[in-house]
Amino acid sequence: MKLVVERYGDAAFATLASELERAKEGDPLRRVTVVVPRRHVGLAIRRRLAAHPPGIANVSFLTIGQLAGELAGGWLASCGRRPVTPAVLGEAVRAVLSGPEAGALSAVAGQPATARALAQTYRDVRGSPASSLDALSTRGGWSAEMARLLRALDRELASYYDDVDLVAAATAAATAATAAATAAGVSVGPVLVYLPARLRPFEVALLEALDHVTPVIVVAGATGDPDADTPGQALVERLSEKPADDAAFAGPVERAEWILRAPTADSEVLAAVRYLMSKNRDGTPLERMALVHSGTAPYPRLLHDVLVRAGIPFNASGIRPLAATVAGRTLLGALELPDGGWRRDDVVAWISSAPVLDGGRPVPASSWHALSCDAGVVSGLDEWQERLADHAAVLRDLADQEDERRSLFERRASECDAMATFVADLSTRLVPPSGSWTEWSRWASKLLGDLLGGPVQTADWPAGEVAALDEVKEVLEGLASLGDRRPGAAAFRAALSAELEAAAPQTSRFGHGIMVGEIGQLAGLELDTVWVLGMVDGAFPGRPADDALVPDAVREACGFPLRGARVSESRRDYFAALAAGRERVLSFATGDQRQGRKLRPARLLLDSMTDPDSPPVFARDLEQQEATERFCTMPSFAAAVAGDLGDPVSPDDWDLRSLLRWTEAGRDPARHFAVDAALQDGFELQRGRRNSTFTRFDGRIDGAVPTSPADPGGRVQSATALESYAVCPRRYFFSKLLGIEARVPPEDVERIEPLERGLLVHRVLERFISEELARPETQRIAPGEPWGEPGRERLARIVAEEFSDFERRGLTGRPALWATDRAAIWGELRHFLREDDDYRAQQRAVPVAAELSFGHNGGEWVTVDLRDGRQVKFRGSIDRVDRTETGGLSVLDYKTGKHVKEEEDPVQRGTRLQLALYGRVARQIEQSHGPIDVHYWFVGDRHSRRGRYRREGFTLDPEREDRFEGVVQSLVDGIEGGRFPGNPAHCKGCDFEGVCPPDRERSWERKKADPWIAEYVALAEPS
Ligand code: SF4
């Protein structure tokens, strides 16, 4: 075997060309085979050789696997053996781990991580000499257990073949002293092995066997870096069976022409793409340039996004696995739902990540998310059915109560029904078969079709997603070949996941557009510009973790390949990549904005910065380094936008740079040509919020007059809705006019929400009083008569029933916290009963109504006359009305929140309208001519004022009613006038804190003197 060591790059190519010419022996049509490290390298060399006289004919460019396939693939297939796919290996691992060979691993045999680790170890050591496995076995203990497992895997896979079997079969064909050997030599002709990346022992054996029937010439690559050349030297020693000639590997290492320091990966990628496009404009074809990285995030995705957005052609592989495509996500996501217990957040995340179909149409993911939150679904198929049904019933009740929103509530109720049906159907479809892999494969294919539809539904999908869908279907067909074993759900999912880790199909071809990918793909290519991105410490060279099953120390002793050797291979890939380019650029980012950490440049980059015969450059030197001819520094994203590395690459990029230059020249950004209406609004917003007048960006709705509460055809109001305008007009605007609601996903509910707690207490007290009122009048409680034991028993029964209803609806949070809350609520209610005894004794009152509603369920609403002659219609529900012995009424409104000190103002500057309104309504309904007392009863405030909880209110009189009407007029005026300022006095706990500008307090102080909102300011902040 002839062995030539040559430097990567032009020197290696020139050697290949001359060896090829020699191998032809003057016969241009003589068959020669060139073994290349990767397919695309073969394509590139073919083009390069063909471009120069005398061209090439009858030369095959094959990887060593393809060569072995030509020699023996047909034979293996004819023996009935099938290829080892990731799923086949996974299934074999599962079988071994579930059998007696699992040994020390049996305790963790069911863990997916164990199966993955064993499969990887098997792949690593596969093809090693039998003596290595023997050595592992004789070490005893854990090592011997591993040897037993690896041998068991060999037996499991005996009816399949992998690259080791293929190459071994080819070796056998080549060594056999038969016509087949001669035929092999004749068929492939002389074999030239070009820049082998890594030849494993069985591949070396094939070359040695071929060398007996045809000339074999190996052109090995050298970089000049001792670490990077370690694998190459080992290969040479193995092939030549003597120590490598150090001189052949010596020489200066490749260095970059220049280096870029950028603040973030985003700026780095933008600068790199701009630079390459400027080279393209100067005449360098796109396919003569490459953008490479170590394969770590965020570069693959970032490059893909920038190039796609700019419409720049590129070819790339391995940007995302099949599992990340729509088809992969849909199938794997669906299969995981039952194991996850049908968690609501899993289901919502799944339907939000893919166009999953329901009745031929994509499911409305965001609306289903909101409705399932409102229904309180957390997990479990029963909850999906019961809680959605309950919520649909609530919505239908609301539809009956509110005529003007009937269709909205009915539509939502129907969506709840549809969602419940969808989940039920899906759970049925996800009941797996019990049979063989073939049945599972058919079942999963049908499921995929049901979920994503056929050609009609995928017609608008991007080409890459359609290709990925086809690939996933093929993967499923491939799983059918795993035989007659019954896989079970976990094994099927593991096998599918393993298969879907394969790269999604490329939709571009090598040689078209910029080459994008991992750095190892460049060895053996010849390009004009190579740009290496992401050269930070830890990524270059990457350091693989040691193997927990067969660590490197054991591997070294037994003669297995070392994981740690990959560090040298990474260094070799780096130098080989630099040798592929006429111009080489390295870049690194100083910060990782996604993880919020600083980054340091890689040692290899620092070495490239170091001039020969100069002291080494360290990371701290680069921190101080000014820009030079070889070092370009970019301090910020703005600098990247303004940067002179090249022109912008997309219309957005152009506009951004132009705008930056415009503002740097001191001109008004709003007058820039690229500033569209949306951006103009942004500038106007900034200006508007900074000045002292009240603008449309502060809640001034000019021209679009909102629906007035006094509109005769408009909605019937609740007192609390108008109160919310008084608390903060902007909050009213968001919640009542725009209908925005905050939602806490039920799975995030730690303890019962204050709103639900209030509803629970109200519900208990309403039932307690209603049951009293349902008794014959003569048997009802008398003024001054305590509730006593019967009352306490009734209360306990109602409380138990309501507690269990709230628990069933998933509204009570974590059990431990609920235990505390339910004890506290029960304590409050018992205390209420004692206080009620005192109250009725003092007032000489008895209940006459509970939850006295008006304006609901088609009932008559009440009106409040405005001073301009119009009316506002109100609806509501009064918690309780008692009649006193003097013929007057006592109107009570329970409050479960914290007690707030009452002011003299009966309507508390508009924030408490209920009492005055309810007093008027009670008088009207109960036909009372006596005094009307109205009170808030702070049920949850039992610890205040030395154990006496509070009841606060007043007696309704003409003066207070006048104040009530005046304030209602003011609030209506504010709403009709489109005045919705944010009042920062009540921001704490407001649902819109994240939406409102953070400087709202300063803004309020600056603008509240504007006459436009004088009426509201006079109400909210009386002097
Ligand atoms: S955060 Fe403050 S200003 Fe904004 S809506 Fe809520 S209460 Fe009003």
Image (cartoon, helix red, strand yellow):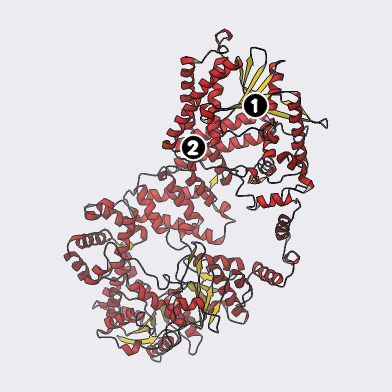
* SS for dot 2: helix
Q: Is residue 763 above or below residue 737?
A: above
Residue at position x 26%, y 64% from top?
550
Q: Nearer the viewer, mark 2 or mark 1?
A: 1
How many numbered tags mark residues here? Answer: 2
Residue 207 as seen in the image, left or right of residue 342: left
Q: Is residue 120 above or below residue 836?
A: below
- Reading the image, the residue beneath label 1 is 953
Taking the image in four quarters, ligand 1 sits in the one at top right
Name the disc covering residue 384, or none. Answer: 2
Name the disc covering residue 985, or none. Answer: none
Residue 607 location (% of width, % of height): 43, 81
Instruction: Give the residue furthest to the top.
Output: 778
Image quadrant where residue 144 sits: bottom left
Dot 1, crowdedness within 10 Å: few (<14), some or many (≥20)?
Answer: some
Q: Is residue 940 above or below residue 524?
A: above
Image quadrant where residue 149 sits: bottom left
- Amino acid residing under circle 2: Trp
* SS for dot 1: strand
Residue 251 location (% of width, % of height): 38, 89
